[in-house]
Image (tube, rainbow, N blue to C red):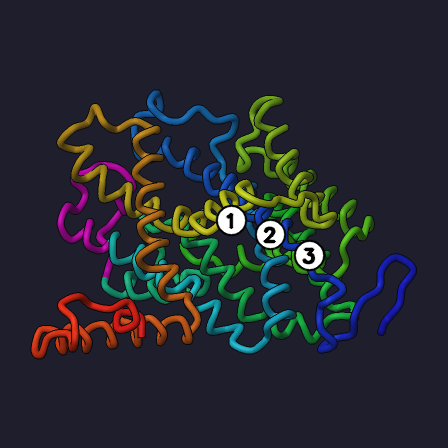
Amino acid sequence: MVFTRRTVRPAVGEGSVMNEPQRGFWPVLGGLRFLLAMWVLFDHTYNVGPAERAIPVLTRSGLMAVMCFFVISGFSIHHSIASRPEGYLRRRVLRILPLNVLAVAIGWLAWSVFGAAGGYLVPAKAPTAWQFIGCMLLLEAFVPVMISFLYPAWSLSIEAVYYLLAPLFRKLEDRPHIPVLMIVSGLCFVGWPLFRDEYVAAGNSYWLTGIVMLWAWLAGWVAYRQPRDIRYVVGLGIAGLASVATQAKFFDVHHFGSAAVNCVAWIGTLIVVFYRVGDFRGRVAAVCDYVGEISFPLYILHYPVLFAVTASLFRLYPNLNWGISQVAISLGAAMLAYHFVDKPLRQSPGDQFGRLRLWANGLAFSRKVMRTGVPGSSKVSRIELTR
């Protein structure tokens, strides 16, 4: 064991039992993820319809929501790889790739059928097959393949790189490399306008964005291993507030309310994650778990879904194009995707094989009944049905 004055840290490979959050904390993170996804969705209602019909918001920038997403992601990924290292990459692939492929498929189908008919989220030029393939493989972090109606995937492509680096970060624990990376990345983010006067996510490839935003993801990574470390909380808090100040126009800070919502979101997320605030149980926990599960499909699918809807339904019935209807459609699409794509694919192999075996037994029994009847009775016995 490695001891410090502030905390007790298990050595690398020794497990994470001491840092395991209580069960009731995960619904808190689920609810927070959902609120952040809704923040982004509300902001984007200004991009897919008349501004006067959009959802009223204090800031039209979702950059802070993405930063807070990264903090939660770093915390959750550290837990995943520390508690269950076996199958870590497989779980990550099953979590992000199928829904991303679905998002690209929806966008491709809508573009193929409707083209630029909707007038919203239309690319400056027709996307190529290579761009669709690149977006499907989350290559936006490396090559310029971004398509406007798939825009939210910029952060996912960066996050996928962080997932790949997680085993390396695990090996670097108890060394100064991670704090140094956080300092360099954080300083670059705070000083971003000094060397690039554009929105940090405005480019067409995002490798540089991934470097300057790494500190936010590592904030969550460190919070898992070193909870209640006041040095990190203060340092990260100052860095976040300084970023809001230096990039005020990119955080859409134009009055006290917009500044406050960005600052409160950042400091609040750090406090929740570092101090593990909250312990939800019962129905509240179930609701927060569920909305947390649909937050990712909500985030990644809402842009291509709304692109398709504005080019079809809202084009025929423009009076339906209100922010509230966009939110309702996006939530419905997210729930469908979760129940019919995300959740089934992430079941354990045992669960999947168990269902297949149950279906096969049921089919075989049905064929037997149709061919020979049920022996000794005109009614199907409960034992036969459940064998």
| Distance from Cα at disc 1 to Cα at disc 2 | 7 Å
| Distance from Cα at disc 3 to Cα at disc 1 | 15 Å
Image quarter of residue 354: bottom left
| Residue tagged 1 | 289
The residue shown at (77%, 59%) is 226
| Distance from Cα at disc 2 to Cα at disc 3 | 8 Å
The residue shown at (29%, 48%) is 304
Q: Looking at the picture, which amino acid does disc 3 mark? A: Pro
| Label of residue 21 in the image | 3
Local crowd size for mark 2, using a 10 Å CA cut-off: few (<14), some (14–19), many (≥20) = many
Residue 82 appears in the figure: yes
**Total count of labels:** 3
Extreme residue in the left direction: 371
Q: Position of residue 118 (x, y in %)?
A: 20, 38
215 or 222: nearer the eye?
222
N-terminal of the two: label 2 or label 3?
3
> Magenta stretch containing residue 122, yes or no?
yes
Q: Magenta residues, as a range?
A: 108-128
Q: Position of residue 109 (x, y in %)?
A: 19, 54
Compared to residue 84, the image places residue 311 above or below, namely above
| Label of residue 44 in the image | none
Q: Quadrant of the C terminus?
A: bottom left
Is 16 left, or right, of 31 in this rendering?
right
Q: Secondary structure at mark 3?
A: loop
Q: Looking at the picture, which amino acid does disc 1 mark? A: Asp
Local crowd size for mark 1, using a 10 Å CA cut-off: few (<14), some (14–19), many (≥20) = many
Q: Position of residue 53 (x, y in %)?
A: 33, 23
Asked whether disc 2 touches disc 3, contact meaning CB atoms under 8 Å apart, the reply is yes
> Magenta stretch containing residue 307, yes or no?
no
